[in-house]
Amino acid sequence: MSNAYLRWFTSDQEFPFFIQYGGHDEDMELHRHVDFSELVIVLNGNATHIVNTEESFIKKGNVFVINGDTSHAYKDPTHFQICNIMFRPEMLASAGPDLRKSKGFQALFVLEPFYRNIHSYPSKMALAIPNLEYVESLISVMIEEYKSKQQGYQTMLISRFTEMVVYLSRHYDTQEKGIEGTSLMHLANAISYIEDHYLEPLTMEEIAGKSDISVRHLNRIFRSYYQMTPISYLQKLRLEKACYLLKHGNLSITEISYECGFNDSNYFTRQFTKAYGMSPKTYRQSL
């Protein structure tokens, strides 16, 4: 096992902070962070996350914090891309009392990292696609600020980092119930493929083929893990995206239906109304 130091990534002693996109095509060796903590956001794909001697599967949307005393590594990456945010723990000490009272903040940034160092403790946070897209927009701004280093960039980065901490704390979610063994790896591949291509035309046969299992087996493990079919999950993602566009954009209902993978705007309206108890038009007017 090797040690990693923040000075390997930044020589700025007055601003101990570093952010980058990380891509892993091969296994990473077990290492620990001597003098910094790391916030990891999985942007794409999946991998096996090794924490001390325990293993768990992580996929697109997972978010977790690794503290200095905890050794970790990745293996068996599949289209695996992450964002690493490395920071000194004292940066969180300046969080306001309202945030420190937040259960999400305490869970994600305090309790999870603490228990992860003691025993196996998989990430309990999995961002929905629209939430992940918002986090990705924050990451993009932060990385641009970090690279350009314009006047006031440190203040801007602290501000954006604080915004991300608050946002993630608010969206901290409960641990999904999992299943063990090879089936989970097939499921992780299926989920990653759906989440990467949910706005495109997809069939059960295509999803199962990308997961290297039969349609029947895919349906079975999907139901046991998510209590829904893969197609229902696909539609759920599309409807969540539609909600985001209705809230933040000016596209027409018809344009949104096509943008979210529905080829029939009337069918989109029926499914949206069934899921949310109101039509897309009423939903937009209620915001």
Image (cartoon, rainbow, N blue to C red):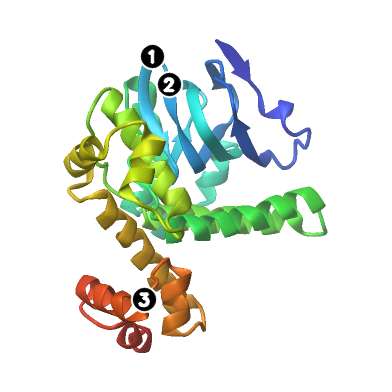
The residue that mark 1 highlights is 53
Residue 20: x and y in percent read 66, 41
Tell me how far mark 1 sits from mark 3, CA to CA.
50 Å
The residue that mark 3 highlights is 264
Q: Secondary structure at mark 3?
A: loop
Task: Name which residue lies at 46% across and 58% down.
Answer: 200
Residue 125: quarter of image: top left
Above or below, 133 relative to 212: below
Q: Quadrant of the N terminus?
A: top right
State if disc 2 and disc 1 touch (CB < 8 Å).
Answer: yes
Q: 26 or 138: which is nearer to us?
A: 26
State if disc 3 and disc 2 touch (CB < 8 Å).
Answer: no
In this view, the residue farthest toward the top is 1
Q: Which mark is residue 50?
A: 2
Residue type, mark 2 in image = Ile
Tell me how far mark 1 sits from mark 2, CA to CA.
6 Å
